[in-house]
Amino acid sequence: MMLRLGLWSDKTVRDTLLDRTHLGKIVIGKTKGNGHKKRPKDADGVVMIDQKDWKEYQGLHEAVKTQEEHDFILMHLARKTKMVKRSTSKTIYPLTKILKCGLCGHFLGFQQRQERPVEVRKCWYTDPYGVRCPNMAVSMVQINAAVQQAVEEQIRDVELKITSVDANRIEHLKNKLIELNRGVTAKERALEKEQKAFQADIYTVDEYKAIVLKLKGSITALNNEIVATKTEIKFLEESSSAEKLNVLLEFKRLIVNPDLTYEMQNELYKTILECVEYKRTEAGGIELNILFK
């Protein structure tokens, strides 16, 4: 028997870990067609069969791993293959680490040829079975136009939200604040009135103390509610859709500056975007799924 010298390649180790025969099974039907190099010219070529259509039978050989162990291996290999490929390019483009493939979820790369607009490269990802992601390249001109349109739509949506939700809520809280302040004023006047009544010997000391304690308790409760209402109003005014709208409008104002570098544009996009998923349609168009912050 010939012994293998040296280290196994990454592919050999991966293929060994994925091998289902180690579960004590016989797997057939992975491919179809004649793959021999001397096959007749009219023979069908080799076609890879989808894993869900493989046929499995319990073999006579002993299993060296359980199904649970095999699933654990698949999970870890999947984590590895889904890691973002490190780019050798040092150039930061406007949508670097923002634009993702809408088919496999990996970040996409960019390139710029001399005197031509920036292009999104076709997806680089290849799965463990050697199948390349089919998502194709596209000009950044198309992506930028779609993103800018989405920003305009987002601005309109946020403006509508402010009109229908935030503004109404803030107005309600401000009216509530007016009523709470009126309540405090009324309780303070009642306290002054009871003090005069006590001075006129209408109440005993114990009766007066009980009345004062009750009124002061009501004033404290109203003041606490005033503080909470003011806090909510401030939060809505500073951290609500109104603030989000300001960020979007500021982005819209700054992004058209012709002096911005790609890296500066990238930082601007990161202020409003979580990610942009892109895929090419069969008709040659593009589909974008844009997630705003």
Image: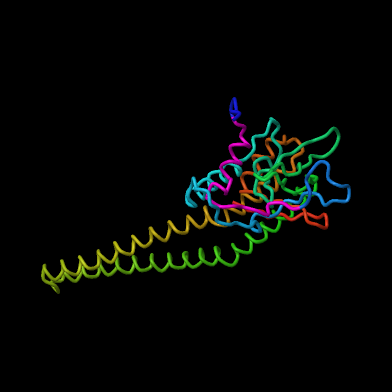
Residue occupying the point 68% across, 54% down: 29
Residue 260 occupies quadrant: top right
Give the percent coordinates (x, y) of residue 160: 63, 64
Q: Report whether 184 appears left or right of 252.
A: left
Most extreme residue toward the top is: 6
Q: Let me know if residue 199 appears in the view.
A: no
Residue 72: within the magenta?
A: no
Asked which colour scheme the image uses, the reply is rainbow
Q: Nearer the viewer, residue 206 or 242?
A: 242
Q: Nearer the viewer, residue 223 or 190?
A: 223
Taking 144 as reference, is 230 above or below it?
A: below
Asked whether residue 34 is in view, the answer is yes
Q: Residue at x 79, y 43 (%)?
A: 36
Question: Compared with residue 184, is residue 122 higher up or lower down, i.e. above or below?
Answer: above
Q: Which of the 4 image quarters holds residue 190?
A: bottom left
Question: Residue reaching furthest bottom?
Answer: 202
Q: Quadrant of residue 270?
A: top right
- Measured as percent of width and height from the top left, residue 197 is found at 19, 71
Q: Is residue 16 magenta?
A: yes
Left or right of 144 in this view: 249: left
Q: On the rendered structure, is 147 left or right of 4?
A: right
Task: Give x and y (percent) for residue 219.
Answer: 29, 64
Instruction: Judge by depth and name the residue closer to the eye, 150 or 123.
Output: 123
The part of the chain drawn in magenta is 8-32
If the image is split into quadrants, where does the N terminus sit?
top right
Above-or-below relation of 210 to 57: below
Q: How many marks?
A: 0
Q: Nearer the viewer, residue 98 or 203?
A: 98
Residue at the right extreme of this rendering:
41
Q: Position of residue 132 (x, y in %)?
A: 72, 45
